[in-house]
Amino acid sequence: MGRLHFLSHEPLAPRTSLELGGPAKALVEVSTVTEMAEALEWAKTSDRTVWVLGGGSNVVIADEGVEGLVLVPALRGIDVDRSGNGAVVIAAAGEAWDDVVAETLTEGLMGLECLSGIPGTVGATPIQNVGAYGVEISDVIEWVEVFDREAGTVIRLAPQQCSFGYRTSCFRQYPNRSIVTRVAFRLRADGRPVIRYAELERTVGSGGTPPDAVTVRQAVMALRRGKGMVLETGAPRSVGSFFVNPIVDAQGLAAVEKAAGNGNAVPHFPAGESLFKIPAAWLIENAGFCRGYRRDSVGLSEHHTLALVHHGEGRTRDLVALAAAIRDGVEQRFGIRLRPEPVFWGFPDSDPLNGGAR
Ligand SMILES: Cc1cc2nc3c(=O)[nH]c(=O)nc-3n(C[C@H](O)[C@H](O)[C@H](O)COP(=O)(O)OP(=O)(O)OC[C@H]3O[C@@H](n4cnc5c(N)ncnc54)[C@H](O)[C@@H]3O)c2cc1C
């Protein structure tokens, strides 16, 4: 326990991309699995709830902050194993995700380029199965190493054991069970990147020689910048997409089309057998919330209606109230209840958009 440095009443807002929320009653950064085990033991004996914080780019923290212990996995290291086909890149949980993407491209490896520019840490990528531009992290995961809190040991999980789905996994469903310590990605050393996303294909050009992975990364970054989906100094703060795109069956799609009225085509994309994904951004916009919409210190991004933004000097409760108004507006207009993408900490209600902040 000697090396652990516990901070009390530590402000959390500066550790999140929204820059909102109150303090943590206690916070500790751990750089080894041994330290992680010690911190967890301390939390157990002092009967504290543990909250695992990476880069804070997908959390909404109540203004009152959180009781318990916020544990920040700061484990570092990136290894490349070229012994098999292609290469396996093993990255520790505390590494910045986009640095890992950049490093794999420097190594001439392909597979992560479409996931360029996503903020946060490696350890968080499996939690909601991060995805962008037609690729999900589960497409390239070889294994996920976690500290199993019940067993008190480190175990390795194959992708099939992680229940990956659209913006979900077993880690998201059972947040108290395990803490990710390392993730291994199987990448390719030859060939060309596979592009599955029409907008990206248009950007890099569909004819002629297929683009290399570095060109794809540059195109993804440019597209993300255009949508305000890169964390940049001076830009309004956000968690990226605030809602996930709803998936409906044929009946559900017909209901939305009916609600939209004649001549108002509802965009949708195949999402499995007889299922369709409807862009939440389209639903939000057509429920009357436009880009740049503002309510004092919070609002919608000027680039994308899916990103709720904080302009500074605001409170979490204002952001949550805006999210609730948007969710309700979409439900009244189209009969679809949007599901928030980020996780919520420190709220008394299991559905924070119902109760607002404490
Ligand atoms: C501008 C912007 C753009 C974004 N674009 C995308 C995108 O294109 N696609 C996408 O999927 N997401 C996107 N996001 C959301 C976010 O960046 C990702 O979900 C990211 O993986 C979160 O990483 P983090 O380290 O910041 O996690 P945090 O926000 O710190 O935590 C998120 C969740 O993961 C858990 N967690 C974190 N680390 C660990 C760990 N080591 N072990 C166990 N649990 C852990 C936390 O407890 C929490 O439940 C975007 C966010 C922003 C701000």
Image: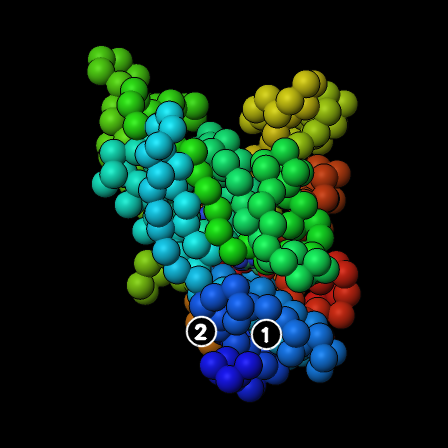
Q: Is residue 222 visible?
A: yes
Q: Residue at x 22, y 15 (%)?
A: 209
Q: Which mark is drawn over residue 317?
A: none
User: Distance from label 1 to label 2 (Cα)?
Assistant: 22 Å
Residue pushed farthest front? 83
Relative image position of residue 224 (x, y in whole percent): 36, 43
In the visual, does 238 lie left or right of 351?
Answer: left
Left or right of 335 on screen, residue 343: left
Residue type indicated by callout 1: Ala
In the rendered image, residue 1, in percent from the top left (x then y), is placed at 55, 81
Considering every residue shown, the one lying at the far top of the view is 208
| Disc 1 element | helix
Mark 1 surroundings within 10 Å by alpha-carbon count, few (fewer than 14), some (14 through 19), many (20 or more): many
Residue 226 visible to an observer of this rendering: no
Q: Nearer the viewer, residue 65 or 149?
A: 149
Q: How is the image coloured?
A: rainbow
Q: Residue at x 64, y 22 (%)?
A: 272
Q: Earlier in the sequence, mark 1 or mark 2?
A: 2
Residue under the image location 44 percent in, 73 percent down: 14
Determine whether 185 is above or below 145 in the image. Answer: above
Quarter of the rendering occupied by the C terminus = bottom right
Residue 30, position in %: x, y?
49, 70
Above or below — where is 233 with respect to 313? above
**341 vs 48, nearest the viewer:** 48
Residue at image position (35%, 39%) is: 81
Badge 1 is on which residue? Answer: 39
Reading the image, the residue beneath label 2 is: 14
